Image: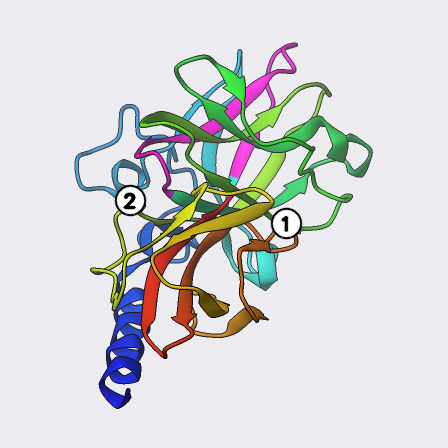
């Protein structure tokens, strides 16, 4: 059995090392100057704005770099501005991503409304770019006039483009933004499963309950996070496991048969 646990450890380590890809990690503290245009459109190839790849629109709005020592998120010096102009109140800043079904995304950004009373005018969204509708339920908005660190997660339901977006819906003021990150755990990220017997889980991706197709009775099922921490365990002739309380994301599931054989598979929690 020792070789099985060694292989399992290698599997988890490989999963941790190679699973997550960083698409954006921008603090604006290097390579930018006050007044720079932050949008990709019109930017010079290879410039910070070109590499960031943001789009933005809104009648009369501009998107520029501000330098105010200590006034950015976490007391940084540089941050972006969504500058209100004219009489229009609707504006968007976004990054469009080509996704594969099952990819797990995490989008983070710090926002500071120019007016505390208009914090509710802004929200984080993930937009299905094919059908032009939001795919993550519930508002993710700043809490007031100070910097708010916001996060939104999404598991791609289809292979297509998605927009990770900050939307302004109303109000006559602008917004500051800082510390943008976007990561993805690809659906194809795992290495080959380490299986000593025929074993499958379904449905996968799953929302509430997973069931098993196994050639051997299962003595124990354990689920591990990407960091290798055990988040769930169930024993004694396991036929199904409730996972509704797990956070969305990708996990590694280890199944142990009654004779000591081990099988592992990637689990995607919606």
Label 2 sits on residue: 48
Q: Position of residue 36 (x, y in %)?
A: 38, 38
Q: Position of residue 242 (x, y in %)?
A: 61, 53
Residue 95 in view in this figure: yes
Q: Position of residue 219 (x, y in %)?
A: 48, 72
**Nearer-the-camera pick, 35 or 264:** 264
Q: Quadrant of the N terminus?
A: bottom left
In the image, which is nearer the foreground, mark 2 or mark 1? 1
- For image coordinates 60% across by 45% down, the residue present is 208
Residue 179 in view in this figure: no
Q: Is residue 203 left or right of residue 33?
A: right
- For image coordinates 36% across by 79% down, the residue present is 260
Checking the image for residue 244, the label placed there is 1
Q: Which residues are magenta?
A: 81-103
- The image quarter containing residue 158 is top left
Q: Residue furthest right?
A: 117
Relative vertical location of residue 172 with respect to residue 102 in this rendering, above or below? above
**Nearer-the-camera pick, 65 or 100:** 100
- Element carrying mark 1: loop
- The image quarter containing residue 232 is bottom right
- For image coordinates 66% across by 19% down, the residue present is 169
Q: Is residue 100 magenta?
A: yes
Q: Position of residue 56 (x, y in %)?
A: 44, 24
- Element carrying mark 2: helix
Relative vertical location of residue 4 with respect to residue 83 in this rendering, above or below? below
Q: Residue furthest bottom?
A: 2
């Amino acid at each position: 059995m020792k070789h099985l646990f060694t292989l399992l450890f290698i599997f988890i380590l490989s999963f941790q090392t190679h699973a997550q890809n960083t698409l954006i990690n921008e603090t604006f503290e290097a390579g930018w100057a006050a007044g720079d245009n932050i949008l990709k459109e019109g930017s010079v190839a290879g410039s910070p704005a070109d590499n960031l790849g943001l789009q933005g629109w809104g009648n009369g709005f501009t998107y520029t770099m501000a330098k105010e020592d200590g006034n950015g998120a976490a007391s940084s010096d540089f941050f972006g501005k969504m500058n209100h102009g004219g009489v229009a109140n609707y504006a968007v800043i976004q990054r469009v991503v080509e996704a594969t079904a099952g990819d797990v995304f995490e989008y983070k950004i710090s926002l500071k409304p120019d007016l505390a009373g208009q914090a509710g005018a802004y929200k984080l969204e993930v937009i299905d770019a094919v059908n032009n509708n939001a795919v993550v339920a519930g508002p993710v908005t700043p809490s007031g006039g100070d910097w708010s660190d916001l996060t939104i997660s999404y598991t791609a339901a289809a292979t297509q483009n998605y927009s990770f977006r900050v939307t302004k819906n109303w109000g006559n003021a602008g917004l500051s933004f800082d510390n943008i990150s976007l990561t993805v755990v690809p659906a194809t990220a795992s290495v080959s499963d380490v299986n000593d017997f025929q074993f499958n889980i379904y449905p996968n991706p799953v929302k509430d309950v997973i069931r098993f197709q196994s050639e051997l009775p299962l003595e124990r099922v354990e689920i591990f996070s990407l960091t290798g921490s055990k988040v769930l365990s169930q024993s004694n002739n396991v036929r199904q496991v409730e996972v509704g309380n797990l956070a969305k994301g990708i996990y590694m599931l280890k199944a142990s048969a009654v004779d000591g054989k081990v099988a592992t598979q990637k689990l995607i929690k919606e």
